Amino acid sequence: MDTVTILWSGGWDGTFRFLQLASKEISIQPIYVIDKNRKGTEYEKDAMAKIIDAVSAGGEKNFKATILPVKFYTVEWILENCADENISAAFRLLREKYNVGTQYEWFALLAKKLCIQMETCIVHQYHGKVEDAIDAEAILTPIHDDVLGERYQVLPKEDNDTVTLVFENLLLPSIRLTKKDEERIARENGWLDLMKLSWFCHNPDEKGSPCGLCTPCDDAMHTGLEWRLPKKAQRRNKFKYAYLLLRKAKRFLSRKAKA
Ligand SMILES: [Zn+2]
């Protein structure tokens, strides 16, 4: 049985792919990278556990995969044990030019160190940062003769291998889909209730509600999934810059008061 490794943090896109994989006769190895700066970590782990339980219970949804226990790696461990200056130098260029998310450096270092190709669930969106980098400096191509079909990989464009250095071991199964496509396919397959268990906010408030201000909240608001945010968070998102300014001012004042 083939084993597919997937980088998954309990979010919408990763959960969608996890469910797609779960419906195949394979084993799935989920990997979760712990970033201690993210307040949503416990919510994400909780979401993953609930989704894995629901899939393992089966029911009428016809899931066939074997799910291996989630492997956890901290960012600190990766930076200390998987250092690779070629990857990191290429990543810094992509960060500078396209503001590509920091997690892709960690994923690339980990995949290289473990010698495993891993699926990372980037979806198509208007001016997606990774997509912009690939469009400008690399070639996106379906994997030849892939047993799982529909997966993409990044190849160098002429002699430019900057993007490939980072994405060499990262497979992109969802890069041609939008979040709305995922919603539609999930609905067609009867997975929408499971998708709703996914977690997406990096900085939930004290009541555990999505913040409306972080990147994944922003993505949900602008990709047709605003229903995932409570009204309060939607309002915060609309007045995002005023909220962020207010938060900065509050932090500044509380630091001053402590000094
Ligand atoms: Zn948020």
Image: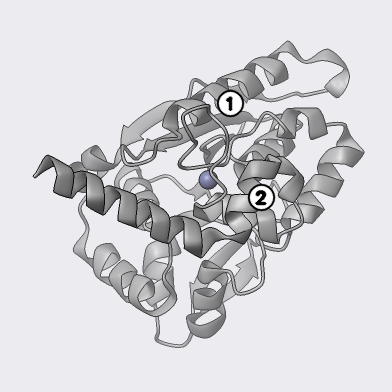
Please tell me how crowded label 1 is: few (under 14), some (14-19), or many (20+) other residues with Cα within 10 Å: many
Q: Determine which quarter of the picture holds residue 15.
A: top right
The residue positioned farthest toward the bottom in the image shown: 158
Residue 25 vertical placement versus 11 (above, below) = above
Q: Is residue 3 left or right of residue 56?
A: left
Query: As shown in the figure, which amino acid type bears the numbered disc 1?
Result: Ala
> For the residues carrying marks 1 and 2, which lies nearer the camera in this image?
2
Callout 2: SS: helix
At a point 56% along the width and 51% down the height, the residue shown is 216
Residues 39 and 181: in front is: 39
Is 89 on the left or on the right of 31, as rendered?
left
Residue at the disc numbered 1: 47
Residue 67 versus residue 134 in the image, above or below: above
Residue under circle 2?
A: 234
Instruction: Return the residue nearer the eye: 125 or 217.
Output: 217
Work out whether residue 80 can be spotted. Answer: yes
Q: Nearer the viewer, residue 195 or 110?
A: 195
Q: Position of residue 17 (x, y in %)?
A: 67, 42
| Colouring method of the image | one colour
Q: Are marks 1 and 2 in contact (CB under 8 Å)?
A: no
Relative vertical location of residue 138 with respect to residue 33 in this rendering, above or below = below
The amino acid type of the residue labelled 2 equals Gln
Residue at the spot x=45%, y=41% of the render? 203
Q: Mark yes or no: residue 121 visible.
A: no
**Spot occupied by residue 149 in the image (x, y as percentages of width and height):** 73, 52
Residue 75 percent coordinates (x, y):
29, 42
